[in-house]
Amino acid sequence: MATQQERVKKQGAESHTFVQEFAKCVNSVRYPGLPPEAVYWAKALLLDTVGVTLAGVEEEAPRIMRNVTFRTAGDGPAVVIGTNRRINVLDAALINGIAAHVLDFDDCSNTMGGHPSASILPALFSAAQESGASGADFIAAYVTGIETNCKFSRGVNFYQYNKGWHPTSTIGILGCTAACANLLKLTEEQTAHALGIAASLASGVKSNFGTMTKSLHVGHSNRSALFAVMLARDGYTSSTVAYEHHHGYFNAFNGKGNFNSDLILPEWANPLDIVRPGMTMKLYPCCGATHPAIEAMMAVVRENDLKPDDIEHVEVLLQTRRLEHTNRPQPQSALDAKFSVQYVVARAVTDRRITMEQFEGDAYKDAAVQRLLPKIHAGTYTSEHFPEDHHFGSVVTVKTTSGKILTKKVFFQLGRTVDIPAPPELMKEKFDDCAGRLMPKGRVAEIYSVIQRFEKLPDVRELTDLLALDTAPVRHATAA
């Protein structure tokens, strides 16, 4: 059987433009050609995203979006996760996308510089519920979306990220479009048009980090991606040079000389990014850029049994790009606290763990934390600490009231890549904790069981039905 890479090369021989080649890659991925590692990680990331989505349902941002959307949304086939409503597939993708990302607890990609799963799965669930897709086809589409997000990022990042765009939405919309096109079996021409439409619907700026609008980026891009696919399926067209044109995606988002499209497609599926380097599984419900500092601080505290009153001064060093949006000495809201390296390091001292409760309500105003914040200072590390091309580490140095200097360096936090994966027991513990905030224990166990055999499901709605609060069985027509 030909590999994914061999099929891409064979099919790409007669293509002429970037988006046409791109469409061939997207349509080349099918479940029978996936390596077992890809299936394993797809199910692990699916479990993780379902858990954090359920945990995010009752946050203010998705609640407001439900209130606004439900005023006009009629009944439809798609579950609004964690509710008893089923509405049209586009609005469900929007609401569920916000819930998936609002806690900032969803997985990340080093290559993408963003969150691949939350930018794909909500719309993919909607598409699967409309079509009655199988679990195997869903996994292939999901892997396609992640591959698109990561390989595309090789050509545009980290310039796009540094310029101020939010890759989870500006690139994530492309991965989501690819995933939905793959699942709904669009032709190569239709897929190319869908990707071209998506190029005009991409948006999201980093100035809105720390607010509800960050998660809106993800909901909006999920909805827009599925919208692009549905339009293309019905004959809507776009430019065949929507990316490389002088007014196309590459030049509009990056600018001349700040991208390299030649890095995107040649290594497609060789290997799949979901296999290597793999995605980052978050063990803390806050910005991933702060996680190495959290682990470094917790190590210092535990190894030396430090109490808050033992600390005179803390210096936290991060990579320059990551410090830009995490240097928030005095967070002004619970969402703001998720991006404050000072706040999470203080919590590592006061609580010796990082939990969802620390980012709820007025928890960021905790008196013990407020006393510590002025003692915590953030800066950038240099080549004497890490190689110049290393973006993911942290160095924490603590001066105690007794005069001791304690330093800890974390190169990668646990779960950052497949080489240092989050152990299965921690992944399940996180899922149980997240899903259990909304669902009864029995339902949580049932969801977990279904995802473990996901590739064998004849219909993905066996899972999505469980994500609704109503418990009555739903009869679905068999997909044609």
Image: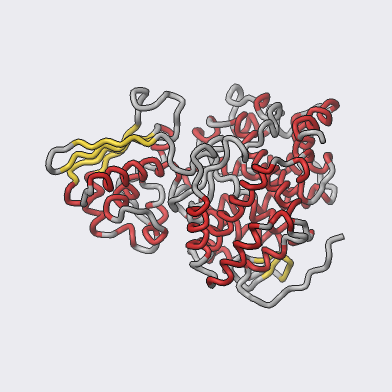
Q: Which residue is the extreme one toward the left?
A: 402
Residue at 33% across / 57% down in the picture? 364
Q: Is residue 433 above or below residue 412?
A: below
Give me the residue at 62% from left, 38% from top.
Answer: 275
Q: Nearer the viewer, residue 185 or 401?
A: 401
Q: Quadrant of residue 474?
A: bottom right
Q: Would you say 220 lies left or right of 420 here?
A: right
The residue closer to the viewer here, 31 or 163, is 31
Q: Is residue 310 visible?
A: yes
Residue 331 position, x and y percent, is: 34, 51
Q: Is residue 99 visible?
A: no
Closer to the camera in the image, 260 or 307: 307
Q: Find residue 248 and report its image quarter.
A: top right
Residue at 55% over, 45% down: 115
Q: Quadrant of the N terminus?
A: top right
| Residue 369 at x, y percent in the picture | 26, 54
